[in-house]
Image (cartoon, grey):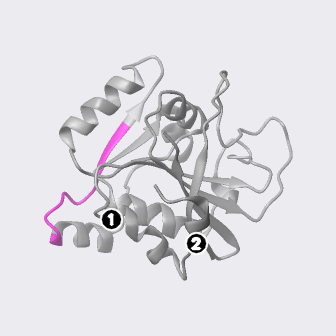
């Protein structure tokens, strides 16, 4: 694992994401939050995102074998189609299915460690991407199932304690992160962290 002093500033989003493509069996969360750590505005992510953030999200999806999303996030945001036609064609040209497997998670269903173990059996050596929401991210960290976090910092200060935070978890986590890379695009700061063992 790279020490923090080795973190690299990448010139663009594609270079920033490149290590996720063909990087082996990684489980990576891709999240966006305001400067003050809010993951929603009015219960949705919409106002926090933008063209640059969507570039990161869709770039990670295109490289992924599976995308894990909390059931409530799917209901709030809608997940009818994960990729556009161009991305689907690029995946198919590489011998992959047109879209990654979409996996819905609910705390009332299969425990997350079992779900992730099943995904890893189906997709050994591949990238698994989690898009949250905040409770799913909390569970991934608590269960030590997360290898990396890709965090987009949106240029907004939201306030409003009713809005969801980037990560929600009732227990103390104490997880240490090591900064691997960062880039800036469209006013967003993007950070890629390794989760220390």
Q: Residue at x 65, y 21 (%)?
A: 171
Looking at the image, residue 90 sits to the left or right of residue 61; the answer is: left
At horizontal 66% and vertical 68% (from top left) the residue drawn is: 189
x and y, in percent, of residue 61 in the image: 38, 58
Q: Residue 120 colored magenta?
A: no
Between 190 and 25, the one lying in front of the other is: 25
Residue 57's x, y, as percent? 48, 61
Q: Is residue 100 magenta?
A: yes
Q: Distance between the Cα atoms at labels 1 and 2?
A: 18 Å
Q: Residue at x 55, y 59 (%)?
A: 3
Residue extent of the magenta highlight: 93-103
Q: Is residue 158 above or below residue 68?
A: below
Instruction: Judge whether 115 appears above or below 61 on screen.
Output: above
* Residue at the outermost top position: 108
Residue highlighted by disc 1: 21
Report which residue position mark 2 lands on.
52
Q: Is residue 120 above or below residue 154?
A: above
Report the mark closest to the observer, 1 or 2. 1
Query: What percent of the width, then of the height, locates residue 72?
Result: 53, 33
- For residue 68, which numbered disc appears in the image? none
Query: Is residue 87 rendered to the left or right of residue 93?
Result: right
Looking at marks 1 and 2 on the same chain, the residue that comes earlier in the sequence is marked by: 1
Taking 126 as reference, is 154 above or below it?
Answer: below
Q: Secondary structure at mark 1?
A: loop
Magenta-colored segment: predominant secondary structure = loop
Nearest to the observer: residue 132 or residue 171: 171
């Amino acid at each position: 694992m790279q020490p923090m002093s080795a973190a690299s500033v990448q010139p663009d989003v594609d270079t920033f994401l490149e290590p996720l493509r063909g990087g082996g069996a990684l489980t990576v969360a891709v999240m966006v939050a305001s400067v003050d750590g809010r993951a929603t505005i009015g219960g949705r992510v919409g106002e926090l995102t933008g063209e640059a953030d969507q570039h990161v999200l869709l770039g990670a999806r295109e490289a992924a074998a599976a995308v894990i999303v909390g059931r409530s996030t799917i209901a709030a945001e809608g997940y009818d189609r994960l990729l556009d036609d161009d991305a689907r064609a690029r995946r198919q040209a590489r011998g992959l299915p047109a879209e990654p497997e979409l996996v819905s998670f609910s705390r009332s269903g299969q425990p997350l460690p079992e779900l992730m173990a099943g995904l890893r059996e189906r997709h050994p050596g591949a990238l698994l991407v989690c898009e949250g929401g905040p409770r799913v991210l909390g569970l991934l960290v608590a269960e030590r199932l997360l290898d990396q976090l890709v965090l987009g910092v949106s240029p907004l200060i939201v306030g409003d304690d009713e809005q969801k935070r980037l990560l929600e978890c009732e227990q103390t986590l104490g997880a240490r992160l090591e900064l691997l890379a960062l880039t800036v695009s469209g006013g967003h700061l993007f950070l890629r962290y390794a989760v220390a063992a």
